[in-house]
Image (cartoon, rainbow, N blue to C red):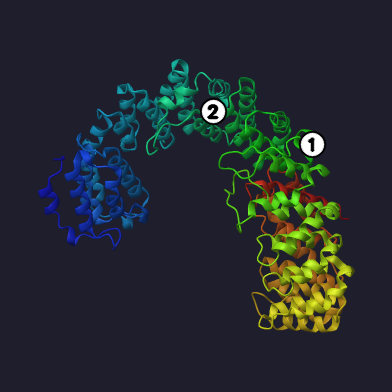
């Protein structure tokens, strides 16, 4: 029988104790503890799941039932014959963390005293004969003194290394200079005389309380982590509590790169050195992980491109699919900067290589890279390859922060000059797969961006007017086509959705733009702006297209500009300028949306819209000009995204900034 008295367990008045969750009453806690005690050596992690459910640590509270269960859980964890000891120790750590982070009002009054009484048993867990138990119990250590005691007593490297890391974390949380000095002495000694893996761990420990330590030890980190002979030793000893299994060398590289995030130059030097060493030694796994970290640096900082571009170009010929994939994607996001690699990219157009868990083939990313540099070799088969991930399904899966295939509209929108070559394939897909197809809206967005160049697709777009899922997207595409789509005006008027007033206005506007009745459209849209209350205020953006003819609505538009949300105010500002011909107060309202970026605002929610609005109005104040110059000089992507979209949005915003700065 485990070191737990079933009689004592039954003596607890469980029925009178409040549990963390109503649907897991305290009596279920007693049942879960009893089951574990009876199973003892046969108990598994799965047998602990009911106990996790009863404690409900995710509620961020410590209930009376949790306090009552604590001594029994500690006893079970300390029983040498218990089969699920490490899981139970993990549970104890979770209970401690929950109590430390919870609001005092939701922590049971008896918790802290009960926990204090268990300290001798926690010390016993830290000295347990089984290394996996000692390792899992490290977060239960009572401060730096207890950890230093373990450090000097510990001989098993799989525990010694996590003790060293724990010392660094404890020093980071200590305000006592003497305590920090004692930990610094330990890590310094390990750096001087430790084995290679332990020396890397010492840098990690030191970096926890001194962020400059990894920068100072960059040579050591680069040398050890790029040494193929050391690689197996990481997996032999690099364990941390709460993580199943050991860390690989590649895991440690990722964590090391994270230590350097506050020192961009050092972080870039680190990944460049690892990539260079991996290429020299043929260390494919190191090359992959270093490229992953390089990609994350590039997503954040434009300045890293100069160092990473030539490396990526060289790696296009690497024998490993995963390395070629990452190199091709890196060049694709760099766009025109990668023009010198066009021939090497063209050689990979049919490369079927893939990277595990990442989307697309090497050829797909090479093709996209060629479109980004304007190379026509990317065009044959482009539409078909873009459609391929959607064949037989409506969407595709990916992780937003990882390299992935771009959205169809992001590839095709910049290719208006090649519309004549690409349109036949787009038109065929719209005919074959238009109604209900996964890319119909995307293709309509592309045709809208191509404008008059998309006019040959007029029949396919008109055919979609009858489908309410696509009709308004089709209307935008037809208006963008200009005079060539004038014959579609009757069909546009017929696509009105009777029970959707907003649709009526958009259709009336589009019919006018295609040669229909301007006055009828102005009456309908003007009336909506004059009568609709916040938050929509009616189609203010459409009203601006009528210019001075919308003069009777000017006062209402000015009201909307003063009282609407950011999006509505920007639309109203442009509309008022269009109606009155006066740059003020519109330019000031738009400029107010641009000023925060100079102070570090990185939301960019309406930034591009405001830039385009100011470019239309045609005047810029000295304060806005100064803010935009500051933003232009930032070494960061002007985008909230952290995948390929960061590059596209950054390019778009920087181009718009230059356009505004060129204003008189």
Residue 612 in sight in this render = yes
Left or right, 172 with respect to 375, comes to left
Residue bearing mark 2 = 214
- 110 over 323 or under it: above or below: below
Which numbered circle lies on residue 342? 1
Q: Residue at x 71, y 60 (%)?
A: 442
- Counting the numbered discs, the total is 2
Q: Residues within 10 Å of mark 2 (few under 14, many from 20)?
A: many
Helix, strand or loop under label 2 = helix
Left or right, 527 with respect to 225, comes to right
Image quarter where the N terminus lies is top left
Left or right, 240 with respect to 584, comes to left
Q: Residue at x 81, y 52 (%)?
A: 415
- Furthest-left residue in view? 7
Q: Position of residue 50 (x, y in %)?
A: 28, 52
Residue 446 in sight in this render = no
Going from N to C along the chain, the mark reached first, 2 or 1, is: 2
- 146 over 299 or under it: above or below: above
Helix, strand or loop under label 1 = helix
Q: Nearer the viewer, mark 2 or mark 1?
A: 1
Q: Residues within 10 Å of mark 1 (few under 14, many from 20)?
A: many
């Amino acid at each position: 029988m485990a070191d737990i008295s079933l009689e004592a367990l039954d003596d607890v008045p469980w029925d009178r104790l409040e549990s963390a969750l109503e649907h897991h009453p305290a009596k279920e806690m007693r049942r879960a503890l009893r089951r574990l005690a009876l199973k003892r050596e046969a108990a598994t992690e799965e047998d602990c799941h009911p106990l996790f459910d009863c404690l409900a640590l995710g509620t961020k509270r410590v209930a009376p039932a949790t306090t009552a269960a604590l001594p029994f859980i500690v006893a079970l964890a300390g029983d040498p014959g218990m089969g699920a000891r490490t899981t139970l120790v993990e549970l104890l750590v979770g209970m401690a963390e929950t109590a430390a982070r919870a609001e005092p009002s939701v922590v049971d009054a008896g918790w802290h005293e009960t926990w204090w009484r268990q300290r001798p048993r926690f010390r016993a867990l830290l000295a347990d004969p089984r290394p996996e138990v000692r390792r899992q119990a490290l977060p239960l250590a009572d401060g730096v003194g207890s950890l230093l005691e373990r450090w000097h007593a510990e001989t098993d490297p799989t525990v010694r290394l996590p003790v060293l890391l724990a010392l660094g974390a404890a020093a980071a949380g200590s305000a006592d200079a003497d305590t920090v000095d004692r930990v610094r002495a330990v890590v310094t000694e390990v750096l001087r005389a430790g084995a290679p893996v332990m020396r890397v761990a010492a840098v990690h420990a030191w970096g926890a309380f001194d962020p400059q330590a990894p920068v100072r030890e960059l040579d050591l980190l680069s040398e050890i982590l790029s040494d193929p002979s050391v690689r197996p030793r990481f997996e032999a000893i690099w364990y941390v509590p709460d993580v199943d299994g050991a860390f690989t060398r590649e895991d440690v590289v990722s964590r090391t790169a994270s230590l350097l995030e506050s020192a961009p130059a050092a972080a870039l030097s680190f990944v460049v050195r690892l990539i260079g060493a991996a290429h020299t030694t043929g260390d494919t796994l190191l090359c992959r992980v270093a490229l992953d970290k390089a990609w994350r640096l590039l997503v954040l900082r434009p300045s890293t491109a100069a160092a990473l571009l030539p490396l990526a170009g060289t790696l296009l010929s690497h024998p490993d699919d995963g390395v070629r994939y990452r190199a091709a994607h890196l060049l694709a996001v760099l766009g025109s900067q990668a023009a010198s690699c066009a021939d090497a990219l063209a050689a990979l157009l049919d490369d079927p290589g893939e990277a595990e868990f990442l989307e697309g083939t090497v050829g797909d990313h090479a093709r996209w890279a060629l479109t980004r540099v304007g190379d026509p070799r990317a065009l044959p088969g482009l539409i078909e390859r873009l459609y391929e991930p959607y064949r037989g399904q409506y969407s595709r899966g990916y992780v937003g922060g990882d390299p992935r295939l771009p959205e169809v509209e992001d590839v095709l929108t910049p290719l208006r000059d090649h519309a004549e070559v690409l349109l036949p394939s787009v038109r065929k897909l719209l005919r074959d797969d238009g109604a209900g197809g996964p890319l119909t809206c995307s293709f309509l967005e592309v045709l809208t961006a191509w404008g008059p160049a998309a006019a040959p697709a007029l029949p396919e777009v008109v055919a979609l007017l009858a489908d309410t899922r696509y009709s308004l997207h089709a209307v935008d595409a037809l208006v963008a086509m200009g005079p060539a789509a004038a014959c579609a005006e009757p069909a546009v008027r017929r696509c009105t959705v009777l029970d959707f007033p907003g649709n009526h206005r958009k259709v009336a506007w589009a019919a006018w733009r295609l040669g229909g009745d301007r006055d009828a459209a102005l009456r309908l849209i003007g009336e909506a702006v004059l009568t609709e209350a916040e938050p929509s205020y009616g189609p203010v953006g459409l009203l601006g297209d009528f210019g001075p003819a919308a003069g009777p609505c000017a006062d209402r538009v000015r009201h909307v500009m003063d009282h609407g949300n950011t999006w509505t105010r920007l639309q109203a500002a442009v509309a008022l300028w269009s109606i009155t011909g006066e740059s003020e107060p519109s330019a000031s309202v738009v400029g107010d949306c641009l000023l925060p970026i100079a102070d570090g605002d990185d939301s960019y929610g309406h930034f591009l819209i405001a830039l385009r609005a100011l470019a239309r109005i045609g005047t810029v104040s000295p304060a806005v000009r100064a803010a935009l110059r500051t933003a232009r000089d930032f070494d960061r992507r002007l985008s909230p995204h952290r995948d390929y979209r960061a590059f596209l949005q950054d390019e778009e915003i920087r181009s718009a900034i230059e356009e505004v700065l060129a204003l008189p």
